[in-house]
Image: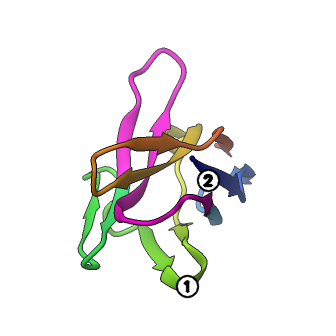
Amino acid sequence: QVQLVESGGGLVQAGGSLRLSCAASGSVFSINAMGWYRQAPGKQRELVARIISGGGTNYADSVRGRFTISRDGAKNTVYLQMNSLKPEDTAVYYCNLLTTGFIAYWGQGTQVTVSS
């Protein structure tokens, strides 16, 4: 089993920054990708950013240029630096880990609220 522990959410004013962290522990053997998804009230969960094992990254169009995903392989930790935050970024942010066997694990979620 894999456990994902997220931290770093909170309340920030529009234009501000937050940094999310997600640490994976347990049976972390073969990671295909780690990333962040978010879900706003009344909306479907959507991909925010993902980093694959080779180092490539994917971003949602809505966050590209403002958010940066990175990882520390030695710590099995992924980070999401969020700059120039907007009210529409308000959501619960979930960490995701996908194994090479395509098993997905999810964190408990962390709330990000951006006030206008």
Secondary element under disc 1, as helix, strand or loop, is helix
Q: From this viewpoint, which residue is outermost toward the right?
A: 11
- Name the residue at 29% across, 79% down: 55
Any magenta on residue 41?
yes
- What is the residue that sits farthest to the top in this orientation? 42
Residue in the foreground of this view, choosing between 24 and 65: 24
Question: Where's residue 35, x and y in %?
Answer: 42, 56
- Reading the image, the residue beneath label 1 is 74
Tally of numbered discs: 2
Q: Which mark is residue 14?
A: 2
Q: Position of residue 91 (x, y in %)?
A: 57, 36
In this rendering, which labeled residue sits more in front, label 2 or label 1? Answer: 1
The residue type indicated by label 1 comes to Ala
Q: Is residue 17 magenta?
A: no
Q: Decide if residue 60 is in sight here.
A: yes
Look at the image and give the residue range highlighted in magenta: 24-48
- Relative to residue 55, is residue 113 drawn left or right? right
Q: Amino acid at mark 2?
A: Ala
Which mark sits nearer the N-terminus, 2 or 1? 2
Q: What's the distance in space between the residues labelled 2 and 1, CA to CA?
A: 33 Å
Position above or below: 10 against 56:
above
